[in-house]
Amino acid sequence: MNHTNKAPSKEGALSYSQKIAISGMMMALYVVTVYLTQSFSFGAYQIRIATAIYAMAYFFPFLILPLGAANCLSNLLFGGLGIMDVIGGFAVGVITTSLMVLIRRLGLPKWTTAIPIILAPGFGVPIYLHILLNMPYWPLTLNLLVGQAVAGAVGALIVITLSKLNIPALKGRS
C-alpha cells in the first residue's frame, strides 16, 4: 500500500492519501446529510436520504468501512437508540456498500445499485429496530422499504450520472 503523498505508479490509481481524503469527505457528507434530514431519518417511519451516498462505493470500493462507520457515527450522534442501533447501522452500511462493489464487479446494469440501498436497510434495520421500538417487524419493514425507495432511486441516479461524466478518478474502478 502506498503510504506517501506521491502519485501512485498505476495509471488512474489513487494514492493512500487520496483514499483517506475521499473517505473523510464521504463520511462527513453522510453525517451532515443525516443531521440536516434527521427529522425524517430516524424512527419507525424514515426516509434516510443519506443512504444514497452508499452508491459511491460503486466507484470507490475502499468506502465500504468508512460509510459503515459514517452510519454508525450518525446513529450515535443523532439516533438516540443506543448501542444496538450504532452496531446495527454499521453492519447495514457495510453490507449495503459491499453489494455496491459486487454490482460493479459483476458488471450488472447501473440501475441495479438502487436494489441494495432499498433492500439491505429495508430488511436489515427492522431486525433490531422492532426490538428497540417494541413494534412488529413486518410493518417496520414495509415503512423502511418505502422510505429507502427514495434513497435507492437517488443512489442509482448518482451512479448513472457520474458514470456519464468524464472524471478520470471514476473510470475503471472495481
Image (cartoon, grey):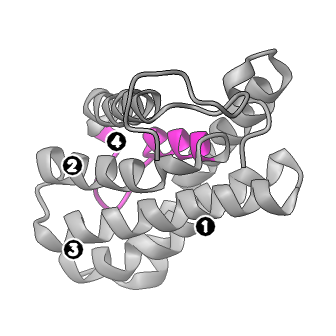
In the rendered image, residue 115 lying in the magenta stretch gets the answer no
Q: Nearer the viewer, mark 3 or mark 2?
A: 2
Q: Which of marks 4 and 3 is nearer the N terminus?
A: 4
Could you say where residue 42 lies in the image, as x and y percent from the top left?
29, 51
Q: Which of 77 and 131 is in front in this view?
A: 77
**Do the CB atoms of the residues marked 1 and 3 lie less than 8 Å apart?**
no
Name which residue type carries label 2.
Leu
Measured in 3D between alpha carbons, the distance from the residue under mark 1 to the one under mark 3, in whole angstroms, is 20 Å
Q: What residue type is labelled 4?
A: Phe
Circle 2 residue: 73
The answer to the question of whether label 4 and label 1 lie on touching residues, with beta carbons closer than 8 A, is no
Q: Gap between marks 3 and 2, in whole Å? A: 20 Å
Q: What residue type is labelled 1?
A: Leu
Which residues are the magenta region? 39-57
Residue 20: mark: none
Q: Is residue 171 visible?
A: yes
Q: Name the residue beneath numbered marker 4.
A: 40
